[in-house]
């Protein structure tokens, strides 16, 4: 097993997050969020509110379903295996990724024109969590966390392509509605936080045989057990003779005279 017990927050936090996401989508359906209210609008003052609220808003059922499953799984892994820093990672990653999206100029890389858009959805947080979990295991090089890294890479490795404009891979009849900027910002923030927090929480255990220049007979339990169980094997071992103080009398006198 990867863990001895299940952390309570590993269930509670994903449930709270999913509840808020679906509540936000229901309010959207009832018309409470319209005309880009609550969305991130890059470099537009009114769009700053979206840094907090945009993860709760989604454009369609397909959109919210696509974010709900990875959000639940990745939050569970974060709070289960990084409980001491999970809150910091989620909150800092949430705000940092959203702020970075807001700061990125809304320029169409193909036409060079400014294209103001309303950015909503929790995919930025998905990228923060996925990239943090993957690179944190690599940076720490701890067996359990490396296993988590491999699981994330196995199931969400294709996320890396979402960090690039969709137009690079297919001929679209109209501009893509997928915000690759959110994915890119989330991925970068996740990597940076994995590096900054690499020394906090679970670390690789170092065993005595990993220190080639260190050896202590007292720490060698097998050796001690052997000595206790086979005392006869040590009866005829050569013993170091005790020093005779009279053999060093001249040396002692010279030191006293100095």
Image (cartoon, grey):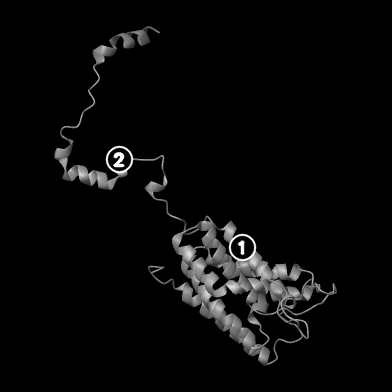
Q: Residue furthest bottom?
A: 30
Residue 205 image offset from top left, x and y in percent = 42, 54
Q: Residue 5: give its label.
A: none
Relative to 63, is 175 on the left or the right? right
N-term-proximal mark, 1 vs 2:
1
Locate residue 242: give its quadrant: top left
Up the image or down, 24 lies above or below 165; here it is: below
Q: On the image, numbered disc 2 is attached to which residue?
A: 217
SS assignment at label 1: helix
Residue drawn 78% across the image and 85% down it? 174
**Image quarter hosting the C terminus:** top left
Q: Which mark is residue 191?
A: 1
Mark 2 neighbour class, 10 Å CA radius: few under 14, some 14 to 19, many 20 or more? few
Provide residue 45's location: percent of width, then percent of height. 78, 73
Answer left or right for 77 relative to 158: left
Quadrant in which residue 103 is drawn: bottom right
> On the image, which quarter does residue 189 sit in?
bottom right
């Amino acid at each position: 097993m990867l863990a001895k017990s299940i952390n309570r927050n590993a269930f509670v936090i994903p449930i709270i997050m999913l509840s808020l996401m679906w509540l936000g989508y229901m309010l959207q359906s009832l018309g409470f969020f319209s005309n880009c209210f609550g969305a991130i609008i890059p470099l537009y003052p009114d769009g700053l509110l979206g840094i907090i609220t945009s993860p709760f808003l989604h454009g369609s059922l397909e959109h919210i379903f696509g974010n709900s499953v990875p959000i639940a799984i990745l939050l569970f892994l974060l709070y289960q295996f990084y409980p001491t820093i999970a809150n910091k990672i989620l909150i800092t990653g949430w705000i940092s990724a959203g702020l970075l999206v807001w700061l990125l100029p809304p320029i169409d890389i193909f036409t060079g024109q400014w294209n103001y858009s309303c950015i909503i959805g929790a995919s930025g947080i998905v990228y923060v969590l996925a990239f943090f979990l993957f690179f944190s295991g690599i940076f720490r090089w701890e067996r359990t966390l490396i296993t988590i890294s491999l699981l994330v890479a196995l199931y969400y490795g294709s996320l890396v392509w979402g960090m690039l404009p969709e137009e690079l891979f297919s001929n679209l009849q109209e501009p893509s509605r997928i915000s690759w900027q959110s994915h890119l910002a989330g991925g970068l923030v996740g990597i940076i936080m994995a590096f900054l927090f690499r020394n906090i929480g679970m670390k690789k255990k170092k065993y005595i045989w990993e220190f080639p220049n260190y050896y202590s007979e007292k720490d060698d339990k097998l050796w001690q057990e052997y000595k206790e169980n086979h005392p006869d094997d040590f009866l005829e071992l050569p013993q170091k003779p005790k020093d005779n103080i009279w053999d060093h009398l001249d040396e002692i006198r010279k030191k006293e005279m100095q």
